Amino acid sequence: MSNLIKIASKEFTDLLGNGMIHIVLATFLIYIFISLHQLIGVVNDSMSMALFINDTGIAASHTLFYVFMTYGAFVGVMIGYQAIAKDLYNDAMNTLITKPVYRDTIINGKLISIAVFLLLLMAIVTVFYTSAMFIIFGDHFASYLSSYIGLLPITIIVPLLYIMVFASLSMLISLVINSRPLGLTSSLLFVYISTLTASTNFAGVISQMFPGNQNYIYNLIVGWSPFGILLEIMDHTFMNDTSIIGIMDIQGDIFKLVLFAAVPILLAYTVFLRKDLS
Amino acid sequence: MSGIRILYLVAKNELRRSLFHPINLVLVGIIIVLIYVNTASYASVPKSTTIDPGSGGDVFILAYKNILWVLSYLMVIFVGFYGLMSVSEERFKHVIDVLIVKPLYRRDVIIGKFIGLSCLAFIISSLVLLLTFVLLTSVFRPPLSMGDFLLRILSLDFGLTMICSLTAGLAMLASLLFKNILTSASVFITYLFADWNGYILGRLHTPPISPYLLFGKMVFPISTGATWINLFNANSFMEWFGYALPYIAVLLLLTLLVVLLDCFILTKTDDTRMG
């Protein structure tokens, strides 16, 4: 246990000192700024607000969820990939495996530090976003604060799971593929495929090729794409039904996300145990 | 050796290396699935359908519009990463150190690599457009006017090649600016998100200066107000070309600028080692 904490804290410190994080945080903040600009338009438009039951708190949560979801996948790829790759290439991994620690402890430590780091990053972005909401909307936003805060756990935890899917996939890929640009391309391809399979141009057309219930086939394809799962959760949580029953509906989707994140990690254990490091 | 011969050799080496890379099998696989799915949706469209009432363009050429974003993004990812790999991987493996002690200018290394990657982009783009044409003709019908279709499709081929080349140039720039290979890759990934997924520059209403915005304006030059004129629905090729010409010129100028910047940075760099 102490080894796990040591590896996790070392990785967390490395992440904090990594120059890449400045790029990630700056991009998040710029993206938040642009999304806020669009949110002002949404709040002032009664037709758009009807989608969110005229609740500014729900509309604000929806925007934040979307920001985490779109850029998050890219952040997951970057952080997950570099967590393993940097140690493999600067020989730190060779030193680490000569120590009396299990190889799976190394992966677990890195995974925990990535999750904690992402949570911290998302918390910083959320604080910035919420402050900006108060500055822009003032009392109007304050009156909807309860629904905003009520949805905050879903707004952060679900995208975090989604980001972890890509982080764990990237960790696995960095162990399998030696060329770094190639490994990153492959990791990014999963983000691309995940977005593509959830699109109507792809899932919609494929569903029309089969006889029977086309909606069922469409939902089946979209339901197995991490991006599609998040779109489904977004619809359930922010647009249709924000009651506890609506939240209960997304349990299956959350389970699928956990599964998507866990499978690459299990494979990473196997690959790492059998990998000859040089 | 003459300058042209050197450029030819570097470009040939770059093209051969990227063209026969095993990951291209994945690229080809995704492209075939995408084109097949897109074409399959045309199997149920009556062959007598000519002009799409919604857009005013030939239904045949609209098939290219349906998959334009997904295919161009996929090509940009691949060619961009080859650009990243062409500099950063060679610096990491010290191949570039061997190259620059040879009797050739550093700028020739960059220009040669850029030409090689542009040829790769042209080959991929041409194959994609040709495959779509063959499949679509077999399940649907030929285009209404072959001459007009060829002009439009060659323009699309040129546009796709140019944005991929520009992205490769930007990727090379990232790997020249940042010595750490992971940092340069992260910068490039963030660029891909900002330009293609997050549409950050577009939403900031900046002038079209990024590959995505320039390509968008080139293909869809008039996309606001009551009249929409684009490569797929313009009454004639020349009508579209008249509107798209300024954006094509900016795309060419920007590409030239990025390549010159790449050459300048490599020439001024003392330490070519990679972290």
Image: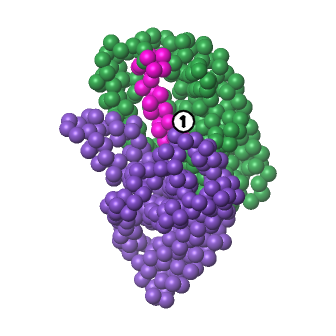
Classify B110 as above or below B127. below
Q: Of residues A152 and B38, which is closer to you in this image?
A: A152
Give the image quarter of residue B5.
top right
The colour with which the image depicts chain B is green
- Above or below for B89 versus A117: above
Give neighbour class at mark 1: few <14, some 14-19, many 20+ (Cα, 10 Å). Answer: many
Q: Residue furthest right?
A: B268
User: Where does residue B168 sit, x and y in percent of width and height?
Assistant: 61, 43
State the residue in front, A153 or B11: A153
Q: Which residue is mark 1?
A: B121
Is B44 one of the magenta-colored residues?
no
Colour seen for chain A: purple
Report x, y in % for residue A137. 66, 54
In which quadrant of the rendered image does the N terminus of chain B lie?
Answer: top right
Q: Quadrant of the C terminus of chain B?
A: bottom right
Residue A196 relative to residue A134: left or right? left
Q: Which residue is more in the foreground, B31 or A199?
A: A199
Tell me if residue B78 can be seen. Answer: no
Q: Residue at x 58, y 70 (%)?
A: A120
Q: Which residues are magenta?
A: B53-77
Amino acid on which the number 1 mark rests in the picture: Ala
Magenta span: chief secondary structure: helix
Q: Position of residue B274 (x, y in %)?
A: 66, 61
